[in-house]
Image (cartoon, rainbow, N blue to C red):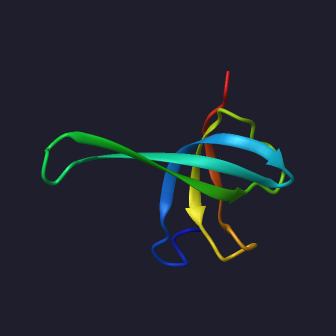
Amino acid sequence: MAEERGRRKMRNGVVISDKMDKTVTVEVVRTFQHATFKRVVRRSKKYVVHDGENILKQGDQVRIIETRPMSKRKRWRLLEVIRRAV
């Protein structure tokens, strides 16, 4: 589905909140090397993700994909579950 609509952004992250109905919060952590100090830096960002069937639980590792705006802050949807929480 992602191929016919052009290049859509994809991210891998962990579900940190599943308290909303049909919506979860996913935290995506990226690491990069600092330009000046050459240290490895970790930055995290939270995304509000559409989960239509309420299948995700806290701790699940997921892949999300960019989509049309579904609400004020929700612009991502679930693509696949990489690993379930134990």
- Residue 72 spot, x, y in % from top left: 72, 73
Does 76 sit above or below residue 5? above
- Residue 37 spot, x, y in % from top left: 14, 45
Front residue of 48 and 11: 48
Q: Quadrant of residue 67?
A: bottom right
- Residue 24 spot, x, y in % from top left: 73, 50
Which quadrant would the C terminus be assigned to in this image? top right
Which quadrant would the N terminus be assigned to in this image? bottom right
Front residue of 37 and 26: 37
Q: Residue at x 56, y 46 (%)?
A: 27
Q: Quadrant of residue 2?
A: bottom right
Tally of numbered discs: 0
Q: Residue at x 79, y 43 (%)?
A: 55
- Residue 35 spot, x, y in % from top left: 16, 54
Q: Residue at x 20, y 49 (%)?
A: 34
Q: Position of 54 compared to 78: left or right?
A: right
Looking at the image, the residue that sits furthest to the front is 37
Does 54 sit above or below residue 3? above
Q: Position of 21 compared to 28: left or right?
A: right
Q: Position of 34 compared to 5: left or right?
A: left
Looking at the image, the residue that sits furthest to the top is 86
